[in-house]
Image (cartoon, coloured by chain):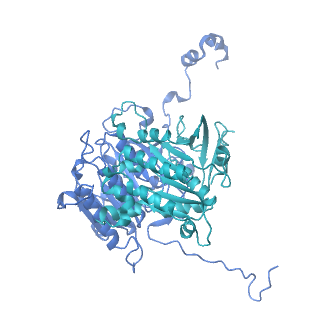
Chain colours: A blue, B cyan
Amino acid sequence: MAAPCSNTLTSFQKKTRSKLVSIPGTRPSVQNGQLLVSSGVSSLDYSFFHFIGSLLVMEDRYDSYSRMLLKYFLAEGVVCGHELFLASARDHPDDIIEGQSQPSDPENPGTMKIAWRYQNQPKVQTALASSVRFGHYYDVSKTMEPELRQAAKCHSFYQLQETPVTTGSSPLPSPYHALLKSIQTVIRKEGFDGSTPQSKVRNVLRLGIHSLGSVLWGDDVCCKDNPAHCHALTTFLYILRGLLRTSLSVAMVTVPSHLIQNRAVMGRIIRLSDTAIALESFKGSEETNPLYKDYHGLLHVRQLPRLNCLSCEVPDTKDLAFKLKRKQFTIERLHLPPDLSETVSRVSKTELAAGCGTTAMGNKHLDF
Amino acid sequence: MFPELNSILNSTPDSFKSSDFILVSDRRANASFLIQHYLAFYLRAGCKVCFLGLVQSFSHYSAVGQRLGVSLAQAREKGQLVFLEGLKDSIGVLLQEDTSHETQPLSYLRSPGAGLEGLFRFVERSMRQSGDGDAGESWGPPVLLIDDLSVLLSLGVSVGAILDFTLYCQATMCSELQGNMVILVRCEEEDADDDDDEEGSNLLQRGLVHQCNLALHVEGLPTGYCRDIHGQMEVWWRQRGETIYNQRKIFHFKVHDKGASFFARGTSSAVL
């Protein structure tokens, strides 16, 4: 029996545990409270979580869409106020940053003229979207306004402009070593690892690395059968994983898989990452499968993240495809397009006859 | 700790076989949940555990351990758990030109060709130390857990050096100290015309499977992806002393937030 209190109905007081750090642009996962960020593409966020401290590796045969996803990732960082770090060996990082898209509102369906009764009905949920909106939408036809872009703090690493440093006894070739040192310096100096007391609000560092593993990084794993540095790329990813785990940062790395023919190396790269996806674009291939008519390519989920939990969020299906419709990049579950041909509701008698076989003649009197 | 797995393998924290070498492997799946099971199992059993966590941070294992009912932080404080945090310590070794003796276990990062002697010495030192806790309690038989051994291949260590390391560990842990060893190896797809396999994880797995007493192999379902059945696990009871069992059984499993359930093929609750 509770002792009667004079003033209140109960003496129960809820203990507020404000242990969860609140950082702009992040939200805790419902499953284990782990902090998540948005990748910039809301349908991608729905497919799997982007945990802080995780590494996402993207394979793209021709580097067409992975570059776009990288820009979405960085644009989301700009809009959320995160710090950015972009490393590239081919295109200058400034070009990639300047090419980011302008945030916009999601497309509003226009009012219907004829079937106005159905206007308020919910649309068929083929596009992956959750009820809680997390992240922003971007209009790929417009580049981000310079004021918005310049408000974000951005560090860049352009391999071709770096002076090669002798790394002494490190097994890593100079470009990889220099990039890791540069990332470590930024993490330390800006306090993402908690080493320097952050008087300002805590923030997240978004790392984008473009086309890692290509020859421009001084790595010959893609072009020789017996490369001199066959473990350089995997060692780099291992150390990068360590840096991510010990700081408030998240990384997206694109890997040009057409250069990496060695499946054993690709397998190791996938296992060293947390999330691994492969984009297979239909560009250039004579894909006549009607199932793929509305899409620009397939998205293969090679690995799902498993951070601080025993099992990750398991999707319903792994058959995903992507398309770039007018202004937005969306990912959908693979499904058959609606059959709008004229003969859809009427099965012709010859087809029925062919299907039924010997009893076709006997069924004549049943045809209405 | 997964109760169903305990009943399949006929072992509990109160009674389990000693001098056991258990090999956990996977192909295109993730068997790290089995390592979490063994970590919780041996900590509950009161053994002194040496855990080489090479691919995840301590907080990851700790968070999962909490779900399974063990506190890694407490075990480490008491001296029951010796934890090598590979990811965090590797940064210092590779980026900082630091050659102090504390970095000896990870010396393979700087010179992958030199082998894993430093790592073995670390394991030996931690296991041979008198295992007395604060309250004067002595721990049970020593146990070595490794997650995962195949990452060393990605860092440039050769298959031969890794097999030497496991042989030394088995001789010390299992034969001499009457303890157990559980190692996770992650394999690639078998490729018939893969010439690079001399360096590969498949070779490592094949080499280790001949040394072990029990092999648990996790793969995805051969029929494809399924939301309710996360994969299949093959249990291969190999040898025990002079007796060679050679019995294999396949189970299906599903991993939850707080554990995993194992069932005979075709008896998933989603199907029945």
Relative height, residue B134 to residue A237 (above, below): below
Relative height, residue A302 to residue A97 (above, below): above
Tell me the quadrant of the picture where the N terminus of chain A can be found.
bottom right
Give how far across and how far down residue B124 sits, in percent: 47, 58
Task: Identify the residue at the far front of this view.
Answer: B176
* In-front residue for pair A261/B198: B198
* In-front residue for pair A179/B179: B179
Give how far across and how far down residue A218 sits, in percent: 22, 51
* In-front residue for pair A251/B35: B35
- In-image side of A82 versus A147 (left or right): right
Tell me the quadrant of the picture where the C terminus of chain A can be found.
top right
Give how far across and how far down residue A26 sits, in percent: 46, 66
Relative height, residue A365 to residue A64 (above, below): above
Residue A294 appears in the figure = no
Query: Which quadrant holds residue A237?
Result: bottom left
**Residue at position x 43%, y 33% from top?**
A290
Task: Identify the residue at the far bottom of this view.
Answer: A6
Give how far across and how far down residue A94 sits, in percent: 24, 61
Task: Identify the residue at the far right of this view.
Answer: A1
Residue B62 appears in the figure = yes
Relative height, residue B228 to residue A54 (above, below): above
Give the number of marks.
0
- In-image side of A123 versus A163 (left or right): right
